[in-house]
Every structure is written in C-alpha cells, then in structure tokens.
Amino acid sequence: MNYNNKAPCFYRDKWIYVHKGSTKERHSYCTLGEAFNRLDFSSAIMDSRRFSYVVKLLELIAKTQLTSLSGVAQRNYMNILEKVVQKVLEDQQNDVGKSVLVGSIDIWVQRMEAIKHWQQQLHCIKISQPASKGMTLTDMPACLQLNIMRCLSDGRDLISLGQACPVLYALAEDQLLWKKLCQYHFTDRQIHTHLMLSERDHLEWKRMYFKLCSCYPRKEQYCDTLQFCTHCLILFWKDTNHPCTANNSGSCFIPMSPQGFLNLFKY
C-alpha cells in the first residue's frame, strides 16, 4: 500500500526468465511483448547509456518481425518508438520480405500515420548553438582532436565530424584513423581479402573500411547492454540485480547483443 494515498502499489522485478525449449509455459509467458514490459524498455530509452542499444533492437524488429508480433507487443513497440522520437526532439540529436499483418487494417493505417508524423518532426530538427562561448573542439590542439576522433567507432561519425570545418576534415582523412577502424571491426583475413592500393601503392584504408562494411557486419559497441545469466537463464540490465543462485555469479553473466536478444524469442 502507498501510505500517502492508500492506493495499492505493485512491484515487478526488472528481469525475465527465458525458459528452455519450446513449451506451453514459454509461449504463454516468455514472449517479446512480456520482455518489453519486464525489462522496462520505456525507461531504458531515456537512459543515454542504453539509447543506442534499444534503437538497434527496434530497428531489427522493424526489419524482421514487426508485422507478425502480437497486438500487445505491437502496441508496446509503438509506445517505445514514440519515446525515441520525443527524446531525439528534446536532445536535438538524430541517430538513428513477405509478411502477414497481425491486427486490423485500420490500426495499421493509424500506426503508419503516426510514423509519418514522427518523420516530419525529425526532418524539422534545427540544432541550436550552445549558449556558453567556452572552448570548442576546434580550439583544442590537433593531438587532442585526433585522440577524440580515435574514440569514434563508426566511420560515418568520422565523416560527419570532418564536414564541420576544413581543419577537422584534414584530420579526419588521416589514414591511421581509418586503419584502426578497419582493424577494430574486421579480422586480418577479411582485410587482406579487400586490399585497396593508391596510385603510389599505399593502402587506402578509408575506401577499404566502407568496402568491408558492405561485405561484413561491423562489431557492435554499446555503453550498456542487457545481460544474460547462463546459470539462471535470466535476462536483466546490469544495474537491476537478479536473484542468482550461482556461487560465482559474475562469471555467469554474458552481454547480450540486440540480435542475440531476438534469437531468444524465436521458437
């Protein structure tokens, strides 16, 4: 009971047990829609550490199984997607086969209208300049600017940063930056398969990076991910502990990629 207004309060653990095998119990409880609720994706999207992870998960669902989700899962999906749009608008940052439709046509028409409205809102984003006139990236020494660029794991971000001004463009063309990106995302064998040489027989690491991206998946990088306990078969966020019964619980936790998360619900 809430002692202030005498209203009943219900506490739900923010983790979900993934049943083994394809059982009747699993079909009725361990569903994607239930995972949305139990893992509190609506709150996770407001956490900057988890934003990219949840957005990638929503993208994968949209490409593979959105139209085949249950009505409850579809409603949860659209609610979370709306929160993504609202967060992007508030932060002024823009990241981000045959099937059978589940649900009535009227509902899907309403959803498509909502998506078009969100797209119009996102296209109208105008990033305002910060009020303070302190030090900017271009005021820093070139060595510090390069160190910041080395922290970027996406070549598209490096391209965008280089478009800001001629100084950053020159730094973003550094072949060593692109070499490190290639080595981070791809194996030596993959790199050697797509070697590209310039007219002076120098390796063109920037061209190789985008060629490799078109041939192989890049390594995914997130600030925070869902964790899976191999001992208890439980999915949870790192800061929401679950009642693990293992003696050395930390050794049982493995990070779960967005695709790995979806694979758990394929049965």
Image (cartoon, rainbow, N blue to C red):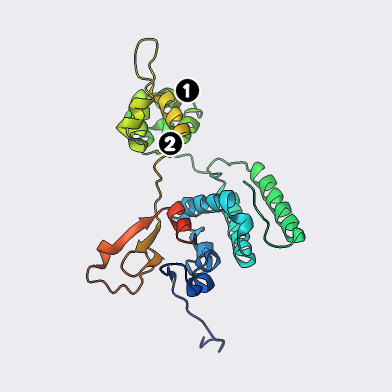
Residue 240 sits above or below residue 113 on the image: below
Determine whether the residue tagged by mark 1 lies in a helix, strand or loop. helix
Q: Is residue 213 left or right of residue 58?
A: left
Where is mark 2, residue-wise?
216
Identify which residue is drawn at 37% across, 65% down.
239
Question: Of residues 151 and 33, which is closer to you in this image?
Answer: 33
Q: What whole-number distance in Å separates the C-alpha atoms at marks 2 and 1?
A: 31 Å
Looking at marks 2 and 1 on the same chain, the residue that comes earlier in the sequence is marked by 1
Q: Position of residue 105 (x, y in %)?
A: 75, 58
- Neighbours of disc 1 within 10 Å: few (<14), some (14-19), many (20+): few
* Coordinates of residue 16 in the picture (x, y in percent): 44, 70
Residue 209 seen in the current view = yes
Can you identify the residue that label 1 sits on?
166
Left or right of 233? Residue 250 is left
Label 1 sits on what residue type?
Pro
Instruction: Name the residue furthest right.
Output: 106
Q: Residue flagged by tag 2: what amino acid is it?
A: Tyr
The local crowd at label 2, few if under 14, some if 14 to 19, many if 20 or more residues have their Cα within 10 Å, is: few
